[in-house]
Structures are given as structure tokens and as C-alpha cells.
Image: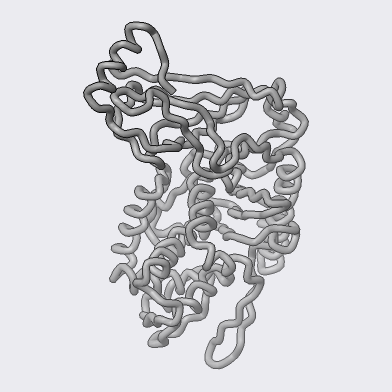
Amino acid sequence: MFHWRKVLWLLPLLAAFSLPAQGEINTVAEHALLMDAATGQVLWAKDGYAPMPPASMSKLMTLELVFQRLKDGRLKLNDTFMVSERAWRTGGSKGFVRVGDRLTVEDLIQRIIVVSGNDACVVVAEALGGSVENFAGMMNARAVKLGLKNSHFVNPDGLPEPPGQLMSAYDLAVLARHLINDYPQHYHFFNVREYTTYDQGKPIVQHNRNLALSFFNGADGLKTGHTDAAGYGVTVSAKRGGQRMILVLNGLRYPDLDKKGGASADWFAERRRGEEAARVLDMAFREFKAYPLFKADEIAGSVDVWGGSYGKLPVTVGKPLAVMLPVEARPKMTVSLHYKAPLYAPIKKGDAVGTLTVTAPGMPNLNVPVYAARDIRRAGIFGKVWMGVEAILGLNRQ
């Protein structure tokens, strides 16, 4: 009969643990989430799992589909896409595309990230999907594969029409982590501070609206967004001292600036958004630190194996594992190894055989796959006889 086995360790270097008080990390944003980029561990959230209008932050999914094709060779940065009249007529933030122009993929990436051009998104959608509607279907299919459970796309740009574009702060953080880890050769585009486009031959210099890039030392991406329904939002990542964090804020609202209106009000709102992101990131890097648990090849425990040349299988986490915890707490945490017993031989080194769960009071559990540290062959007839003897005598084979 199958059942779950659990092996527990108490880690002496970590004493009693409590989640930092809500007052230590806080924001006026309606939705927020802080994630450790190394492990995907959620460190803090404020209504971070509810679907919300993501505005232009949903452009990260449009870019993911582009980066995926660049990685697998279906696209090159110097490939060109034609600008249609539909793309040219798209409202909102402009990348200043012109009907009939052929723009390179690299140029379109810059217009989407730095300029937040909705028109550039439509160019990409029509080139890759045949139509905006088909491309939205591709976005939804890709979201399922990436595990984005609270996301739904109806367009490539995040405009409020047609309605129905939704993402959660958690999904945005997961998507950002994927872009950082899976497409490192293209991540530098998110740190470009300004980009020059041309309208009828006249240069138009546009600045990146993600002012957290300037306000927080170590910030290097990713994307901002704003609509009336969404408020002001930003998905930003920053790295300090070998630690990288991802922060999502959305639903930042500035009614005093809304009354004024105009370009200057927008600029001040973007500045406040950047300052708020920098403030929260500063608290996050101060309050949370990474505590190493296991090295890449360090044995994290062992599991029972039936019918093999060995009765115990050592397991590893496959890569260095550190858990992000509040500095002020002297954490006392349990690390438990879960696997579905009995495991039957043969097992190959590197096979996933269970899950390591790091638990601390007040913190979401961190679940990490564990892998076989060696091969275990299927036992021969004499080995099986001896296993029966061991079972009777209560012996354990290592």
C-alpha cells in the first residue's frame, strides 16, 4: 500500500522563528508580492494571488513568446516584421510605428520594454500569431505551461479593451523569474534607460518609465503598467550581494495627481511609483537574508528502496539551496523529506524521487525536488532472498 514517508531534521543554526510584523514591510499598493528569485519562495504578499488588471505589465507575456522563439531559433534579432494599419492605429502608449515599415525584432523589443508601445505589441502579435486574437490564444496556452493559474489574456498590450485581461501579482512574479532565469541573454533589454524612435524622420527620445531603475541601486528590470482600472503598477527585480528579489506592486493610486491631469501629473505619478518600489525593495533587502542549507552535492537525507542492490538511497537537492528568512528572527525550522513509499529499483542517479519541504511558522512552505545521488540496480534472486531475511530480522541495508 502506498503511503507518504517523512523524515525530519531540526536545523540547529536556526532558532525560534516568527514572521516579521506587517508594519516592517508594507505598501499603499492594493496588490503586492515579494519573491526570492533563486527559489521562487514567496516572502511577503498583500492580496498577491487575486486576479487583477495588469495593464502594460502583461506585455511581459508578449515578450516571453518572442524570447522563447529567439532561444529555440525560430526568430533572430535581425528578423523584420511588417507594420499593419491596425498596429499603427492602436491607442495608448506609442512606439511610433508607421504603416508599411519593416522593423527588426530587436527594435520591437526595445519599443515594447522601454517605450511600452502598444502598437509594437500588435506588430509582434500579428507576425507570430497571424492576428491579435490568435496571439492572445497563444499567450493563454503558454501561461498554462508556465503554471500561471490566475492569468487570462485577450490582447498583447494590456489595454482595457477588450475587457478580461487579468493576472495576479504572484503570476507576474513567476513570469518575471522565468524571464530572468530562462532568457539571461535577453534580460539586459529590461535595463535600457531610453530609446530613440523616429516619426517622419524626426528623432523621438523616450525614457523608460520604470524609475525604480534609477531610484534603487541594483534594480535592473522589468516592466511598468498603468490604466484607470489597474492604477499604477510595476514588476521590478533587483540584485544585491548575490541575492535577487522580485517585487510586484499594482493598484497604486494618486487621486491628488488625477485631479491635476496632464503630462506633468503622469510624470509625478511615475516618480512616486518608482520611489515606492525602491522603498519596499530597500526594506526587503534589509529584513531578509539568504541562509544556506545544502550545497549542490551535499546529501540531504535518504529514502528506503525496495528490490534494489541497496536498501537506502541518498538524495540531494541538485543545486545549492538557501532559504530567505527575516534577519531579526533566529529561525527554528524543520526540513522534511517526503517521498511516496515504497520506491522500487532500478533507480538512476539524478531521478527525482521526492520533495524537501522547508517549514517555518508564519512563512509559506518552500518545496524543493530531491534527486537520487547514485544508481541502484535491481537486486538478483539471492539479493531478494536476503532482503526477506532482513525484513524478518529488522535489519537495514545501507
Residue at (71, 39) in percent of width and height: 288
Residue nearer the viewer, 297 or 291: 297
The spot of residue 168 in percent (x, y) is 49, 44
Which of the 4 quarters of the picture holds residue 291? Answer: top right
Residue at coordinates 42% horizontally, 37% vertically from top-left? 374
Name the spot of residue 178 as percent of width and height, x first. 49, 53
* 24 in relation to 56, above or below: above
Count of numbered circles on the image: 0
Residue 17 at least partly seen: no
| Residue situated in front as seen by the camera: 67 or 321 | 321
Q: Quadrant of residue 235?
A: bottom right
Residue 335 as seen in the image, left or right of residue 215: left
Q: Quadrant of the C terminus?
A: top left
Residue 211 in percent (x, y) is at 69, 62
- Let me know if residue 326 appears in the view: yes
**Figure check: 126 above or below 161:** below
Single out the residue that lies furthest toward the bottom: 201
Which of these two is toward me, 17 or 344? 344
Q: Is residue 349 left or right of residue 232?
A: left
The picture places residue 208, in percent across and down from the top left corner, at: 63, 69
> Between residues 296 and 180, which one lies in front from this camera angle?
296
Quadrant in the picture for the N terminus: top left
Residue occupying the far left of the picture: 381
Left or right placement of residue 234 versus residue 5 in this view: right
Of all residues shown, which one is farthest toward the front?
382
Residue ID at (31%, 57%)? 137
| Residue at the image position 47 percent from the left and 26 percent from the top | 302
Q: Is residue 372 above or below residue 188?
A: above
Q: How is the image coloured?
A: one colour
